Image (cartoon, rainbow, N blue to C red):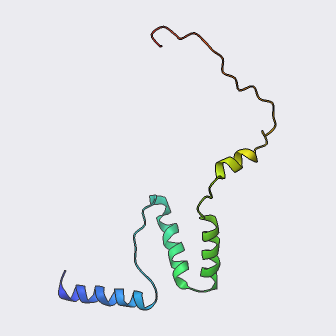
Amino acid sequence: MSEPARRATDAYRKRLARDGLSRFEVVGHEGDKQLLRQVARRLAAGDGEAEALRRLLQGGAAAPRRGGLLRALRDSPMVGAELDLARVEAEPRDGFA
């Protein structure tokens, strides 16, 4: 990298740091590129709308809690239904043991 290019890059990074921003990569689907850029721009604005969007995203992206599958099964409308889940025993087919 040439000296002027390195100085320009250093100055850019210092401005980002001064403003509390950082640069990073995200891996995602090609079709989501514009959406992610728009979200990043909106969040970088730092205004009230950015805070509202941040709260919305943090609520929807929360890590699943332990026992989530068990809770879902317990909340299923099939709870209490008398289902016959017994397997039918059959003779093995030729060539299979």
As drawn, 56 above or below 49: above
Q: List x then y, in percent, for residue 64.
A: 61, 58
Q: Nearer the viewer, residue 66 or 33?
A: 66
Q: Quadrant of the N terminus?
A: bottom left
Q: Nearer the viewer, residue 78 or 51?
A: 78
Disc tally is 0
- Residue 47 appears left or right of 28: right
As drawn, 29 above or below 36: above
As drawn, 64 above or below 97: below
Residue 95, quarter of picture:
top left
Q: Residue at x 40, y 69 (%)?
A: 25
Residue 12, quarter of picture:
bottom left
- Residue lying furthest front: 66
Q: Residue at x 23, y 85 (%)?
A: 5
Q: List x then y, in percent, for residue 29.
A: 46, 58
Q: Nearer the viewer, residue 11 or 17?
A: 17
- Residue lying furthest left: 2
Q: Nearer the viewer, residue 3 or 21?
A: 21
Q: Residue at x 18, y 87 (%)?
A: 3
- Residue 28 appears left or right of 10: right
Q: List x then y, in percent, for residue 15.
A: 39, 90
Q: List x then y, in percent, for residue 61.
A: 59, 64
